[in-house]
Image (spheres, rainbow, N blue to C red):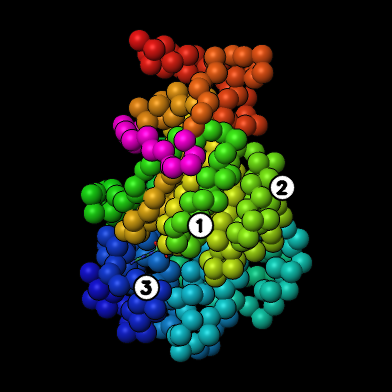
């Protein structure tokens, strides 16, 4: 559905177009009119569905329609669980507001970094606040911001907000907000705690549930390439040299591996950076920004660092090291093929982790044909489940100790293979 038919002003419909959004996604078609009508909304929506724009666009419209005298008095508050998400949502608001007739000021505040620059940035007020709950409370305690002008509250990724132990902070924030306001709650899942939160916060909400239909299911081509563990970086370089993927996210199992692979790529003329738990917040932000602008082609990341990040139009994810669990596999490959775009996920399968990959496939009900690339055909065969050279039985999954359960599963898979 075109954006203009959802009740958005021509300016905002144009903003969506400028971001390359030609048609509204299902969550946008349902949520935008409901929010513009002033309703509370309870939406089940996954990341990748376009949910962020589904609340950002109407928030911006409401802000454009607010009296001039209200400018720089925050009218919307978006609460979310992580700093990465806060930066991302703040960025989407700025992008969408780029060519609007008013200049938007967004305050993005999150914990884990010094509070002073955030206090400075809040001087002179802000129109929309994007925040993690704890830091928001700290800033309010220090009179760096006021919540009395908030007209709309958004709880984004409410399930993760509760998972991360923000329940008490959320209650405190709610007490400090004006009682008459619009409330929007987005959550990927609906455990009982989210239901309870929804009951507490929402007032006769309009319910929106977007099923993952064939139309919205990510279109991801999943491939498995057999290669010896020691030749994976060479293969990666070969693939990068022979394809024109402009942005690539490579997953490895440890911080050391991330640094090592990124470094090797750099030394061979590929613009690459590592993203892991040891990177500072500004390094992470810089790496993501560089990937977005094309200054960087490859990010080599650990699972922890990549959690929750959204890289628009990411054509390829590579599992250099296989993920530990099928759930991590889903999470990793879900970084590509977002919002209707197609994507590719390539897993490097060395002999020692072939059984592990089979298990992942089985759980995913996936069957990726094994491919071999000329010049990189594997020579190694699987080592016994436990060998002297590899006493932990870590195989190709470097830096991670396998659980007893993992080992048992692998042994069973090997047996099945042999039989
Ligand atoms: P989200 O579900 O908000 O995390 O959005 C996932 C990705 O979809 C983001 O990279 C957005 O830029 C992109 N996106 C959002 N809405 C649309 C749309 N209508 N058409 C194409 N891409 C979109």
Question: Which region is colored magenta?
Answer: 364-377
Residue 20, label in figure: 3
Residue 244 spot, x, y in % from top left: 45, 61
Q: Residue 79 versus residue 251: which sits nearer the camera?
A: 251
Residue 250 spot, x, y in % from top left: 54, 48
Q: Secondary structure at mark 1?
A: helix
Q: CA distance from mark 2 to mark 3?
A: 34 Å
Does 375 lie within the magenta span?
A: yes
Q: Earlier in the sequence, mark 2 or mark 3?
A: 3
- Quadrant containing ligand 1 reads bottom left
Residue 58 spot, x, y in % from top left: 38, 72
Overall secondary structure of the magenta stretch? loop
Q: Residues within 10 Å of mark 2 (few under 14, many from 20)?
A: few
- For the residues bearing labels 2 and 3, Cβ distance under 8 angstroms: no
Q: Quadrant of residue 330?
A: top left
- In this rendering, the label closer to the viewer, 2 or 1: 1
- In percent of the image, x 69 and y 74: which residue is there? 121
Q: Which residue is mark 1?
A: 241
Q: Which residue is mark 2?
A: 278
Q: Is residue 414 above or below residue 206?
A: above
- Residue 138 is left or right of residue 4, and the answer is right
Residue 32, label in figure: none
- In percent of the image, x 66 and y 14: which residue is there? 388
Q: Residue 375 versus residue 312: which sits nearer the camera?
A: 375
- In percent of the image, x 64 and y 38: which residue is there? 254
């Amino acid at each position: 559905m075109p954006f203009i038919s959802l009740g958005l002003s021509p300016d905002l419909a144009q903003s969506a177009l400028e971001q390359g959004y030609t048609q509204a996604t299902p969550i946008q078609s349902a949520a935008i009119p409901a929010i513009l009508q002033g309703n509370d909304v309870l939406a089940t929506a996954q990341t990748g569905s376009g949910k962020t724009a589904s609340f950002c666009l109407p928030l911006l419209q409401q802000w454009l329609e607010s009296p001039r005298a209200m400018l720089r008095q925050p009218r919307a508050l978006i609460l979310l669980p992580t700093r990465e998400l806060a930066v991302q949502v703040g960025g989407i608001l700025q992008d969408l507001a780029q060519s609007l007739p008013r200049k938007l000021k967004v305050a993005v505040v999150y914990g884990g970094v010094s509070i002073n620059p955030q206090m400075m940035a809040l001087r002179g007020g802000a129109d929309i606040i994007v925040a993690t709950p704890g830091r928001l409370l700290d800033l309010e305690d220090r009179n760096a911001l006021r919540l009395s002008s908030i007209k709309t509250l958004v709880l984004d990724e409410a399930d993760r907000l509760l998972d991360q132990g923000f329940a008490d902070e959320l209650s405190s924030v709610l007490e400090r907000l004006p009682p008459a306001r619009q409330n929007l709650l987005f959550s990927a899942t609906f455990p009982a705690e989210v239901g309870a939160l929804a009951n507490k916060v929402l007032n006769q909400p309009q319910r929106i549930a977007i099923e993952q239909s064939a139309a919205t299911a990510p279109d991801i081509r999943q491939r498995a390439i057999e290669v010896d563990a020691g030749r994976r970086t060479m293969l990666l370089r070969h693939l990068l040299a022979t394809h024109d993927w402009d942005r690539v996210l490579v997953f490895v199992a440890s911080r050391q591996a991330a640094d090592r692979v990124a470094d090797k790529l750099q030394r061979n003329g590929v613009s690459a950076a590592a993203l892991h738990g040891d990177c500072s917040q500004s390094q992470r932000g810089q790496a993501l920004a560089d990937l977005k602008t094309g200054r960087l082609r490859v990010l080599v990341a650990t699972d922890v660092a990549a959690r929750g990040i959204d890289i628009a139009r990411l054509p390829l994810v590579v599992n250099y090291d296989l993920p530990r669990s099928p759930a991590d596999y889903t999470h990793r490959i879900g970084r590509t093929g977002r919002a209707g775009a197609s994507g590719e996920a390539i897993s490097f399968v060395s002999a020692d982790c072939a059984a592990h990959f089979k298990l992942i496939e089985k759980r995913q009900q996936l069957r990726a044909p094994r491919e071999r690339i000329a010049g990189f055909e594997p020579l190694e065969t699987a080592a016994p489940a436990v060998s002297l050279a590899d006493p932990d039985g870590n195989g190709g999954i470097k830096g991670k100790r396998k659980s007893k359960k993992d080992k048992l599963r692998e042994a069973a898979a090997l047996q099945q293979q042999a039989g």
